[in-house]
Image (cartoon, grey):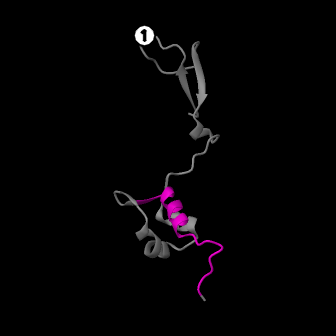
Amino acid sequence: MGSLAVRSDVGGGSFSRPSRQAGMKRISNPLQDGSQHRPPLSVSREEAARMLGVSVDFFDEHIRPRLRIVYSGRRILVPVAELERWLGTNAASTTRRRAA
């Protein structure tokens, strides 16, 4: 299940179940063999809070209202790009001093 069979000759005729026959090449599925791991596009609110180093309660109260969220049924998805945007917008400059 870790590879796909691809026909190298695209002629007419009927299609049959892929097998290792003449004219067939095997290519691996990069998402199954782990050779090309892709980071997720979105995460749960629990994962988002963990990524930012805050509690879920703090995330829900202070950060989540400022993010664009994806609702899919009862599931709440936080786009990773939104977390990165929020961090970039709210990161304090190291040269700026806090008022004492």
Is 44 in front, or is 89?
Answer: 89
Q: Is residue 43 visible?
A: no
**Residue 30 location in percent, x, y?**
59, 37
**Which residue extends farthest top?**
12
Q: Is residue 22 visible?
A: yes
Q: Badge 1: few (under 14), some or many (20 or more) residues near its Cα, within 10 Å?
A: few
Q: Residue at x 53, y 70 (%)?
A: 90
Residue 72, relative to residue 100: is it above or below?
above
Residue 10, relative to residue 28: is it above or below?
above
**Which residue extends farthest front?**
95
Say which quadrant the N terminus sits in: top right
With 14 as the anchor, is 39 left or right in this view?
A: right
In this figure, what is the number of numbered marks? 1
The quadrant in which residue 98 appears is bottom right
88 inside magenta stretch: yes
Residue 22, relative to residue 49: is it above or below?
above
With 56 as the anchor, is 29 left or right in this view?
A: right
| Location of mark 1 (residue) | 12
Q: Amino acid at mark 1?
A: Gly
**Residue 28 location in percent, x, y?**
60, 31
Q: Residue at x 35, y 60 (%)?
A: 74
The residue range painted magenta reads 76-99
Q: Residue at x 55, y 20 (%)?
A: 19
**Which residue extends farthest left?**
73
